[in-house]
Image (cartoon, rainbow, N blue to C red):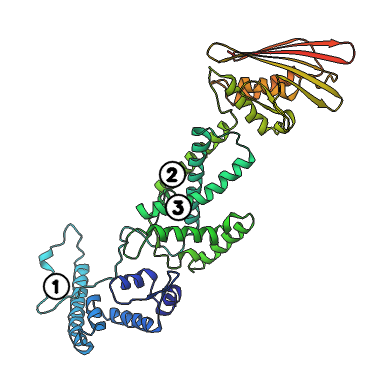
Amino acid sequence: MQIQTIEEKSGLDRATIRYYEQEGLIKPQRLQNGYRDYSEKQLQDLLKIKLLRELGLSLDTILQLIEGREDLQSVLDNQLVVLKAHKAQVENAEDICKMILQDKVTYETIVPGKYYIESGEKKCIENEVVSTPYTEYVYLESHPIRRYVGRYLDQLLTSAILMLIVIVFMRVRPFGDAQSNLLSIATLFLYMPMNALFLCLFGTTPGKFVVGIYLKTPEGKNMSFVDALRREWAVFRYGMGFGIPIYNIIRLIKSYNIHTAGRELEWDYDYNGDVLYTEWDTKRGVLSAVLAIICVTAIGFSAVDAQFPKHRNADLTLAQFAENYNIYAKQNRMMSIEGRLSEEGEWYTPGIYPGPDKTVTEVSDGLRTEYWHFSANENQELTEISIAASSSSRVAVISRKISLAVYTAIMSQPDADIRTAVEAEQMIYEFVSISDKNNKHFDFNGVIVYVAYQEVADIIYKADVVITIP
């Protein structure tokens, strides 16, 4: 029989049963999967222990009976004397209470010497209460919302830490949908060993701590790392449905119904840990909100930082600019069409050997030709990009490649922010507008963009673009 069955048949709660195990009163067998298996004899032993405890016998005395070191008849003869003495003392105490009530005294006016409970040869029984090592906790049978919030906070914290490391500190770029999905998967599998380590070291996790949840063994110790990791895997499997959309919601609802019905969850089956709760108060509500805000802020900051290129510095080199450009090109799915910029300022066209700084790209209504030139100072810092473009299409004379180069130059500056990105997109829209082909000059936080248009005959359109980088 598992612990849930033995609880139902014995009428004892799990903490009491495991405390009896700790005291050596019963010794259930351990199955290969780690579950405790209680026999019919052990159920009868628990019922006997329960009866003897109701008679006021101590656990030490009951253990001596089980081990055959004491005889039940002699123990009960002695206990009967104790119970009679206790009964007399209770009756005496009842008389004293009535006397004090009749005197109508208060705490300040009561005279202790006037009221005396005679003891004589009476021996007061030690009213021993079954205790557990969990004196600092309040054990609750069901609290699914707190458990879910604690686990959600742990996942949120793991995600925040990963995003800060990968995006902000490691500067991994590009960070598009594919990278975001990989990070989500990494979060799911990383938080399990992280939680297991926290449970092994501290008996709780950051998320569980702020909502007042702890996991302890029946001896009041922290779970082992292996048991904690097995438990986390069971949560991922049964409670979260492996993170599979729709199915994970079904599993959450099912787990909620099981828990609120007073039954044990799959991951609570004998993983050598009991779920314990401290009192809920305003402080824990505030801590939960603060942790959630910190995590969301970190995730938001990382998501914003992912919109910026890898290199953001005043002394931008051609190689760094090329890497930033290629990051944006990949994010915008342009690389397969427009090609990739090399560290030397040459264009790589997919499937074609790198050529000079000239690219010819077919468009729907004609041929576009662009001549690119990159200038750098003696420190290899990029100072200017000049492009001479010509096209038989008025619309295509300023290509997406040119627009992206302007955007990259602006966003690579160290003081660029979200507002910069919005304003830069608006500025680029203006200088590629087909409705206005006048010469244009933009100064954007030190990045100067000059565009000169020229119409040659009726079929050729030219544009000279100069990007000066501070």
Residue 104 found in image quarter? bottom left
134 versus 427 height, above or below: below
Residue 54 screen position, x and y as percent: 30, 79
Could you tell whether 232 is left or right of 55 in the image? Answer: right
The one nearer the camera, 188 or 126, is 188
| Amino acid type at image mark 1 | Ile
Could you tell whether 92 is left or right of 25 in the image? Answer: left
Q: Looking at the rendering, in which quadrant would you find the C terminus?
A: top right
Q: Which residue is mark 3?
A: 193
Q: Which residue is mark 2?
A: 286
The CA distance from mark 1 to mark 2 is 50 Å
186 versus 417 height, above or below: below
The CA distance from mark 2 to mark 3 is 27 Å
Q: Earlier in the sequence, mark 2 or mark 3?
A: 3
Could you tell whether 256 is left or right of 389 in the image? Answer: left
State the residue at coordinates (10%, 79%).
Answer: 121
> From where the camera sits, is residue 264 visible?
yes
